[in-house]
């Protein structure tokens, strides 16, 4: 019978422990960053739910809204790819919905700083199957238009 013995010095044991701890910290950090980036599923089937959601983000809306059907393209052009990058920053990804029909609900935002009570700032909620899949806040002002994530910074 042969026996194999392994002699480790205290410095070697300490080094192995440090490497193992580093791997564990890296794995936990990676997991927590990726788990936190995915938004919880938000159901927005009714006007009340959509208004409550926008209110939870700090937005005040007008009473009326517009609703239109859109088809998310199979192939993204440059504009759509840039828009999807905005969606990815807030935890959405429209690539998962290529070729599908969604509804865009557009609400007038009445409390955007510097644009209070002007009819040029809107929140767009992109909803598919009753679930929020994307959105933005934008200004249609020719002078100072913009598009940004739904959540106030």
Image (cartoon, rainbow, N blue to C red):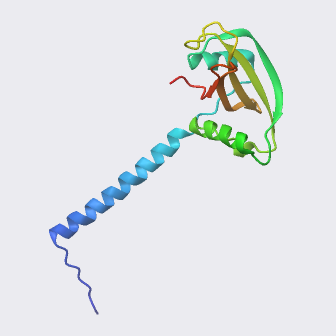
Residue in view at x 74 percent, y 16 percent: 47
Q: Foreground: 110 or 94? A: 110
Q: Total label count? A: 0
Q: Is residue 107 above or below residue 15?
A: above
Residue 64 horizontal/vertical position (percent): 76, 10
Q: Residue at x 26, y 85 (%)?
A: 4
**Image side of residue 108 versus residue 2, left or right:** right
Q: Which residue sits furthest bottom?
A: 1
Q: Quadrant of residue 10?
A: bottom left
Residue farthest along the left direction in this orientation: 10
Residue 70 in the image, given as x and y percentages of width and height = 82, 33
The residue at the point 71 percent across, 40 percent down is 79
Give how far across and how far down residue 21 sits, in percent: 31, 56
Q: Is residue 129 above or below residue 81?
A: above
Whole-percent x and y of residue 107? 71, 17
Hey, which quadrant is residue 71 in on the image? top right
Residue closest to the eye, 66 or 116: 116
Position of the N terminus by quadrant:
bottom left
Judge left or right: residue 33 versus residue 54. Answer: left
Q: Identify which residue, 78 or 124, lies in the foreground.
A: 78
Q: Quadrant of residue 82?
A: top right
Q: Is residue 68 above or below residue 95?
A: above
């Amino acid at each position: 019978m042969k026996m194999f013995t392994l002699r480790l010095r205290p410095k070697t044991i300490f080094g192995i422990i440090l490497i193992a701890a580093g791997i564990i910290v890296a794995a936990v950090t990676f997991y927590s960053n990726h788990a936190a980036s995915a938004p919880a599923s938000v159901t927005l089937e009714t006007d009340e739910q959509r208004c409550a959601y926008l209110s939870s983000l700090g937005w005040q809306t007008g009473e009326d809204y517009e609703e239109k059907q859109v088809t998310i393209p199979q192939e993204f052009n440059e504009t759509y790819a840039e828009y999807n990058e905005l969606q990815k920053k807030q935890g959405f990804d429209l690539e998962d919905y290529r070729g599908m029909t969604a509804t865009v609900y557009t609400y007038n935002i009445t409390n955007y700083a510097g644009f209070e009570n002007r009819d040029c700032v809107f929140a767009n909620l992109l909803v598919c199957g009753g679930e929020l899949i994307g959105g933005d806040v934008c200004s249609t002002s020719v002078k100072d238009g913009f598009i940004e994530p739904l959540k106030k910074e």
